[in-house]
């Protein structure tokens, strides 16, 4: 489903199928700030799920990577975590631009080197990164099949393409992005727009509890709520 022809915020990179030859396994750094983690179980003949992970404001790619790193090996999940070009993501600072371009370049590199399952390509993030993941994921729903938003503040997609499945979590004692003003407003908006939303509230502050990270990983890997 395409509802908006706007090209702002659009990503062009796409999975290209099974890659040829060997590619590095494990954790490696990327140029201009970022990390790629490929689990030891990866095999080019068996396309793997991929999650692009976006950090919160004044954090960096290490924080983004940590969102799902503990569960990546068990799930066979490739993780791509990048630094924003500024203290937070571009659209929060005024509009889609350099961060979209950096994510697109990184995805092109990953897709050309690794076999990625096109039915399990996710974008996820925490706090400002969660707001960005929702916005970028909805704008690029023909690439991202899943969106994971841990304690988002809002969403501002440039348009709507496709209908990715969405996982949202939020702490009921969040003093930074209060749940009443944030997820309890965002989730009904998503549901009214016909998105398949899995929503989890937990008793806690502005954090991503390990149990939530595991549930989100299982949700991505199995397709089950």
Image: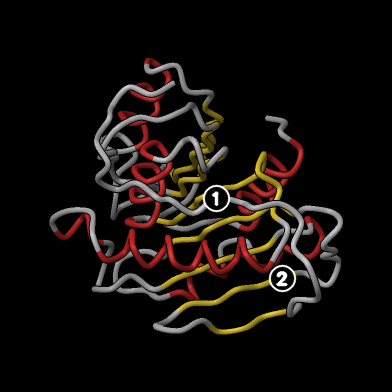
Q: Camera-side residue: 59 or 100?
A: 100
Q: Residues within 10 Å of mark 2 (few under 14, many from 20)?
A: many
Q: Position of residue 61 (x, y in %)?
A: 46, 74
Quadrant in the picture for residue 155: top left
Specify the label residue 14 is tagged with: 1
* Disc 2, SS: strand
Residue found 48% across the figure and 77% down from its top: 34
Q: Is residue 198 left or right of residue 78?
A: left
Residue at which label 2 appears: 38
Seen at 38% across and 24% down, the residue is: 2
**Residue 70 has which mark?**
none
Cα distance in 3D space between marks 2 and 1:
18 Å
Percent position of residue 182, x then y: 30, 38
Q: Secondary structure at mark 1?
A: loop
Among the two numbered marks 2 and 1 on one chain, the one whose residue lies closer to the N terminus: 1
Quarter of the figure that contains the C terminus: top right
Residue displayed at 34% across by 48% down: 131
Q: Residue at x 34, y 51 (%)?
A: 132
């Amino acid at each position: 489903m395409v509802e908006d022809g706007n090209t702002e915020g659009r990503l062009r990179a796409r999975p290209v199928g099974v890659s040829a030859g060997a590619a590095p396994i494990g954790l490696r750094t990327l140029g201009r700030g970022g990390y790629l983690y490929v689990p030891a179980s990866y095999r080019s003949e068996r396309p793997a799920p991929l999650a692009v992970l976006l950090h919160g404001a004044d954090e960096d790619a290490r924080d983004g990577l940590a969102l799902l790193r503990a569960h990546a090996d068990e799930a066979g999940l490739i993780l791509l975590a990048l630094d924003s070009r500024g203290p937070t993501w571009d659209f929060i600072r005024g509009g889609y631009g350099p961060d979209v371009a950096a994510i697109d370049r990184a995805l092109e590199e990953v897709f050309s080197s690794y076999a990625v399952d096109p039915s399990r390509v996710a974008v996820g993030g925490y706090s400002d990164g969660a707001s960005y993941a929702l916005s970028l994921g909805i704008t690029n729903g023909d690439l991202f099949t899943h969106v994971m938003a841990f304690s988002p503040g809002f969403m501002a997609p440039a348009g709507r393409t496709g209908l990715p499945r969405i996982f949202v979590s939020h702490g009921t004692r969040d003093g930074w992005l209060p749940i009443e003003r944030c997820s309890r407003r965002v989730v009904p908006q998503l549901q009214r727009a016909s998105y398949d939303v899995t929503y989890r509230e937990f008793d806690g502050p502005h954090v991503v509890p390990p149990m939530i990270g595991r549930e989100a990983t299982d949700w991505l890997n199995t397709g089950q709520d």
